[in-house]
Amino acid sequence: MTKLTRDPSLTHAQKLDRLGEVAVRVGLGLQEGQELVMTASLDALPLVRRITEHAYKAGASLVTTLFSDEEATLMRFRHARDGSFDVASGWLYDGMASAFKNGAARLAIAGENPSLLAGQDPDKVSRANRARSAAYTPALELIAGFDINWTIASYASPAWARAVFPNEPEEVAVAKLWDAIFAASRVDLVDPVAAWAEHNKALHARTKLLNDKRYSALRFVGPGTDLTVGLADDHAWEGGASMAKNGIVCNPNIPSEEVFTTPHKDRVSGHVTSTKPLSYQGTLIEDIAVRFEDGRIVESTARTGAEVLAKVLDTDAGARRLGEVALVPHSSPISASGLLFYNTLYDENAACHIALGQAYAKCIRGGDTMSPEQLAAKGANKSLIHIDWMIGSSHIDIDGIAADGRVEPIMRRGEWA
Ligand code: ZN
Ligand code: ZN
């Protein structure tokens, strides 16, 4: 057995513990004396405890977990007065932002019910989302700007498992989802930390190759899609482990298979169709089709969740423009599982995707030290939102377009060319 082979003798409890260890050591790179602020659903308590233990073993000075409860969220939508939906706990998000400014690391545990708010009034849903996005902005800017080390890991909640495996009894569905999470997070291997080091090396080789190419645009062609995504001036490809401005190396997503960069906010044109459903804050948005002109979405439709999508696009001036473009081969381990996860952390690592809204400063060369105006001048988009949605499949071809107009194949039928 090498360190990269699967260890079939591991129990569920051992794998959960290793997920906690990978989240702390690989995901966060948590440092001696550093505070940790974690958000999680009550369902995720067993994983929260594994993470908490590993965080203190790694030298955390204080671990603070903010729990949420989906039943409580539903009660608000069922019974709260209309004015409730324009309110967000700004004091809480301000507190998070202040913790980050004082050096705390950030860990989010995903695993929400992808269609929790299906059937709720779309107007209330989008007002609540908007109020939350606005209140969360100061904290999100510190995360998106990589001021701090952060990561997202996931937990197989019963509601999420039922969505992924609708034909299985709940217990079986949860067990199967755990298998998928453990495999994608590389914690079922003999040495997960060594496996992540190898994986990061492979992702870094890919970003170096793309950075050396300096393409001025990417063109996606496939069924329902002919999209040209101009890249920002001095764009930088990122992927895998990354150094935050506080000097700490973290892996922002567990799992992660993507390499990504910043599109130019004014240089996207053509039409594109989503290839997987998008679960956005409890609303399932399926079969999205949009058309871009000069970087801006000028037409949009969706088979489900169209109203929520339309309101998301009106969040602010940057919500109709792209802040990220990411490449993931169709053969990525998550995609090879053949599962549809209805969870962005998983689905975005199974397919090429684009994100509406805020761009990552890190994806501009020297962007870490630039002002918002300097970033905008390079073409980086600004918005309250950052929403990834999937446009890749085994039917998509991608070309790189060089500054002199030369065209090179990057992906054919969803695989690296
Ligand atoms: Zn992405
Ligand atoms: Zn993204």
Image (cartoon, rainbow, N blue to C red):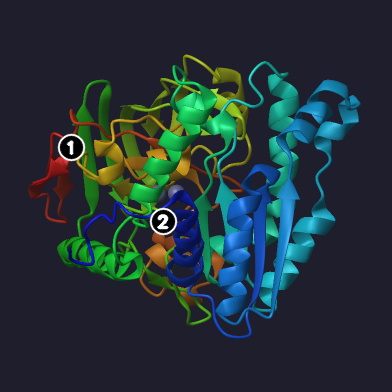
**Residue 154 as seen in the image, left or right of residue 395:** right
Front label number (2 vs 1): 1
Q: Secondary structure at mark 1?
A: loop
- The reply to whether the residue tagged 1 has its Cβ within 8 angstroms of ligand 1 is no
Q: Label 2 vs label 1: CA separation?
A: 27 Å
| Three-letter residue code for mark 2 | Gly
**Residue 291 as seen in the image, left or right of residue 416:** right
| Three-letter residue code for mark 1 | Gly
Which residue corresponds to mark 2? 379
Q: Position of residue 211 (x, y in %)?
A: 22, 65
- Mark number, residue 75: none
Q: Is residue 152 above or below residue 347?
A: below
**203, 29: nearer the viewer:** 29
- Mark number, residue 414: 1
**Residue 221 as seen in the image, left or right of residue 26:** left
Q: Is residue 234 visible?
A: no
Counting the numbered discs, the total is 2
**384, 294: nearer the viewer:** 384
Q: Residue at x 71, y 19 (%)?
A: 120
Q: Quadrant of residue 274?
A: top left
